[in-house]
Amino acid sequence: MSVVSETLEDLKLIVFQLVDKEYAIPVDQVRSIEKLEHITRVPRTPSYVKGVINLRGVVTPIIDLRSRFELSSSEPTESTRVIIVGLEDKEVGLIVDAANDVLDVEREMIEPSPEVVGIVEAEYIGGVVKQNKRLLILLHLDKILQSI
């Protein structure tokens, strides 16, 4: 019975940009969206972990999602944002090119991720949402944060 009631409610998603694609994560996993600030590098961390920031008294690790997905790197711009996400007891910042939107999506609009060969981020994809002419890639935060 709970499955039926779950499918009736909308899912709120934060939509953000990486290179030329739009990605989304559930808004209930997002703590805040911040401008990029000084990051203190931490030795011996994976290359996609850019370091830590002091966010309102909390030391928060920062991940560059471009680097995590093995996409081309770029210099931060005025629209670069850090999305602070929380999963279980972890709080992590994700560097994204821009935070675009908050969308309500019906759960039945989420399709399983397509079987695409050769895409590095494929293991991090939880599904795809087609809305109007937009294609949003829904991310699995637990997989992205797994080795941190």
Image (cartoon, rainbow, N blue to C red):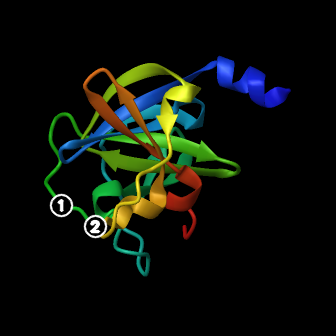
Residue 114 seen from this side = yes
Residue extending furthest bottom? 44
Q: CA distance from mark 1 to mark 2?
A: 8 Å
Q: Residues within 10 Å of mark 2 (few under 14, many from 20)?
A: few
Work out whether residue 145 can be spotted.
no
Q: Position of residue 89 (x, y in %)?
A: 70, 51
Give the left or right position of residue 62, taking residue 146 as reference.
Answer: left
Query: Nearest the camera: 112 or 75?
Result: 112
Amino acid identity at mark 2: Glu
Q: Nearer the viewer, mark 1 or mark 2?
A: 2
Q: Position of residue 110 (x, y in %)?
A: 50, 34
Q: How many marks?
A: 2
Circle on res. 39: none
**Which residue is denoted by mark 1 in the rendering?**
73
- The x, y position of residue 83, in whole percent, is 42, 40
Q: In the rendered view, would you say 11 is above or below 57?
A: above
Among all residues in the image, which is located at the extreme right? 1
Which element type, helix, strand or loop, lies under badge 1?
Answer: loop
Give the left or right position of residue 19, taking residue 114 as reference.
Answer: left
Q: Which residue is label 2 attached to?
A: 70
Q: Residue 33: which quarter of the image?
A: top left
Identify the amino acid type marked 1: Ser
- 98 and 106: which is toward the camera: 106
Q: Residue at x 27, y 39 (%)?
A: 17
Residue 148 in the image: x percent, y percent? 54, 67
Horizontal side of 126 relative to 22 (left or right) equals right
